[in-house]
Structure formats: C-alpha cells, structure tokens
Image (cartoon, helix red, strand yellow):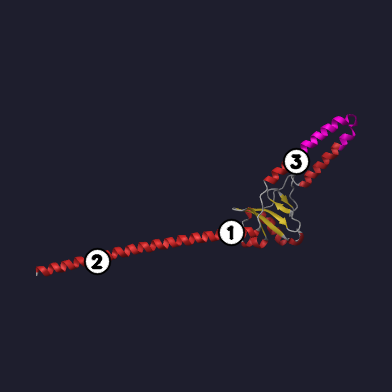
Amino acid sequence: MSKVQRLKPAHKIYERLLWDQDCISGANFVIGYEDRFLGIMEATREEFESEEIPFHRVRYFKDVDTGQHIWDREKRIDLITRNYVNTFTPENDSSSLSKKSLSLNYSDIHSSSSSSVNKYSDSNKNSKESSYNNKNSWEQQSRTIPVFSTKSKKNYLKKRRKKYRLQELNEARQRTEEEERIEAEHNQMYEDKMREVEERILRFQQFQIVRT
C-alpha cells in the first residue's frame, strides 16, 4: 500500500502559481477563502494581496478558464505539484465502478444457469447503490456553502464601515459634550467660590469700619 503524502499548504501553492505560470492555462486563477461574516468568498490575486487575507483562511484555488479546483483543502486535491496521492478523487471512484461492472459482467457470463436469481440480486444491489449514491450527493449539496461575489462583499463591507464610522462619531460627540458639561460645572463652582470670598472680604471691611 502506497503511503499518502501530506497536502501542500496554501502559501506553498500560491508561491508555485506565481513563479510557475505554465502549471495552469493562462495563469488565471482565483482564491477561495472563508470570510468571518459572509462564509466562502472568491478573490483575484490583486484583491487577495490588497486585503491581506491570511493563508490559513484559504480553502481552494480555482482555474478561471476551466472552473476546476486545482487545489482544495477540504477535498484534499492538489493538481499543482502533482505528487499528492488523493485516494478520494472522482477518477478513483470511476475506476472502482468500472472494475465492479467488469466483475459483474464476468459473473453473469459464468452463471447463465442461474440467470433469474442473479438478475434479481443484481437489480436489487444496483437499486441500493443508486439510492445510496443519491443520498450522498444530496448530503454533499446540502453542505455546500454558497459563494458570494466580490461586489456583494464590497457593498457589505462598505455598509459595515459606514455603520462603525457613525458609531465612533456619536461616541466622540458624547465624550465632547460630557467634557464640556464637566468644565462648565467646574467654572460655575469656581465663580460661586470667588463670589463667596468677595462677600466675606466686604463684610469684614464693613465690620472694621463700624468698629472705628
């Protein structure tokens, strides 16, 4: 049994795509990554570098011309380095199904005497396999995360930044009003204190005049 190699990390694949432009047709690819608020998003190379998206959020690299995932973390696909053995690729599944069909045909040829029993068992087995495959395909589709466009993501981020900016402005205005109120109270207390001192000085002077 061949030993399965480790999947190359996203930053290694990204570096390979930058310097080896012959690994995909036209070197035109997009990066699928996971956004904290929107789920799975797609970005071009310029958007990926300008927004400084970390590599640990990258989920796949996709060829724009063919629409094929050339590297996928969850499905464990690596078509860039071509040295990763993926035991769960559709090619292996199709080869196993072809081998199974050949074995069934071979058994049908050598079991002509009991054809009625074999036909019934084969049809029952095929119906079970088809229902199982349909169930698996439905579960995979239900677990698929929708991919949002870059335009919708930018509009969402613009609205969110505007909301946070208004919130910061309101908080700054409230802090300024509170500081002005405290300063006004302090000035009023100072004026009241000075007025009280002046009144005491005036009363003391009047008392001195009366005594003389």
Query: Which residues fall within the magenta stretch?
Result: 105-133
The picture places residue 131, in percent across and down from the top left corner, at 75, 38
| Image quarter in which the C terminus is found | bottom left
Q: Residues within 10 Å of mark 2 (few under 14, many from 20)?
A: few
> Is residue 46 in sight in this rendering?
yes
Distance between the alpha carbons at the discs numbered 3 and 1: 40 Å
Distance of label 1 from label 2 (alpha carbons) = 57 Å
- Residue tagged 1: 157
Q: Is residue 51 rendered magenta in the image?
A: no
Q: Give SS at disc 1.
A: helix
Q: Quadrant of residue 102?
A: top right
**Residue picked out by circle 3:** 133
Q: Is residue 111 left or right of residue 136?
A: right
- In the rendered image, the vertical position of residue 109 relative to residue 90, given as above or below: above
Which residue bears the numbered disc 2? 195
Whole-percent x and y of residue 65?
Answer: 75, 59
Residue at left offset 80%, top offset 37%: 126
Question: Magenta stretch mostly in which secondary structure?
Answer: helix
Q: Nearer the viewer, residue 120 or 74?
A: 120
For marks 3 and 1, the one nearer the N-term is 3
Look at 85% across and 32% down and name the residue there.
Answer: 118
Disc 3 element: helix
Type of residue at label 1?
Leu
User: Visible in this render: residue 52?
Assistant: no
Horizontally, residue 169 falls left or right of residue 183, namely right
Q: Earlier in the sequence, mark 1 or mark 2?
A: 1
